[in-house]
Amino acid sequence: MVIFALIMTVGAILSPFLHIRLMAGMVILLALITVYFFRDPQRRIPDDEHNIVSPADGKVIEIIQEREPDFFRAEVTRISIFLNIFDVHVNRSPIAGTVEFFRYKRGAFLKAYKSAASDVNEQTVIGILGANNRKVLFKQIAGLIARRIVCHIREGNEVALGERFGMIKFGSRVDVFLPSDVDIKVKLRDKVKGGESILGVFANEI
């Protein structure tokens, strides 16, 4: 099928009719954009599993203290990462451990950079319990354009540090909830890479 489509596109480019060549060019451009969007580059995952790595590529847009009622049931630090359409959209586990909490929530499709999106937008919520009872909760949040969340893990699954677990298609947001005593290693407007950039270090491991 792919070979057939390629032959047809090449034939269209060689067509004497301008409008057919323009359509072929648009098809090729769309194909290149799609391949670029779904790219999945290799990452240098830190060897030290005491670190908490970013689950997504993007820009840090919020770092705040708030109460998390479902998994921690305590005050935590929330780090919000906005992914534009040009970022890699493959998501990776921030720590190694067992998925202890999973919830899918239907919702709205506000612009992902808005603070309210963390609560009201469509999302999956994932809580991981690691070694020494270390906890991390994170959300895959759909945005105005991104209306397709892919998540391959559920409660009981084991994940490794930096392991791929899903993606959010076409512009989105990921929120990460950390214990309040974690030493935060990022600041607002920092660019981060999923599975590679260190968001924080557990306090008792510093």
Image: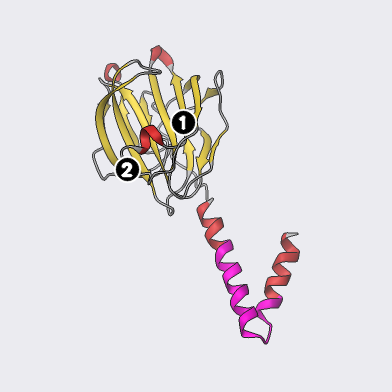
Q: Residue at x 61, y 84 (%)?
A: 18
Quarter containing the N terminus = bottom right
- Using a 10 Å C-alpha cutoff, classify the residue at mark 1 as few (fewer than 14 neighbours), some (14 to 19) or many (20 or more): many
- SS label for mark 1: loop
Instruction: Give percent across and percent down for residue 119.
Output: 37, 32
- Check disc 1 and report the residue beneath it: 93
In whole angstroms, how far apart are the C-alphas of marks 1 and 2?
A: 24 Å
Instruction: State the extent of the magenta-drawn residues as a range.
Output: 11-31
Return the residue nearer the eye: 94 or 76: 76
Q: Give the image quarter of residue 196.
A: top left
- Using a 10 Å C-alpha cutoff, classify the residue at mark 2 as few (fewer than 14 neighbours), some (14 to 19) or many (20 or more): few
4 with respect to 19 (left or right): right
- Check disc 2 and report the residue beneath it: 114
In the image, residue 106 sits, relative to residue 203, either above or below, namely below
Instruction: Give percent across and percent down for residue 106.
Output: 50, 33
Q: Nearer the viewer, mark 1 or mark 2?
A: 2
Residue type at mark 1 is Ser
Label 1 vs 2, first from the N-terminus: 1
Return the residue nearer the eye: 94 or 166: 166
Q: Main secondary structure of the magenta part?
A: helix
* The disc label shown at residue 73, or none: none
In the image, residue 79 sits, relative to residue 34, either above or below, namely above
Q: Residue at x 40, y 37 (%)?
A: 174
Residue 149 visible here: yes
Give yes or no for residue 184 being in the magenta stretch: no
Residue type at mark 2 is Lys
In the image, residue 18 sits, relative to residue 74, either above or below, namely below
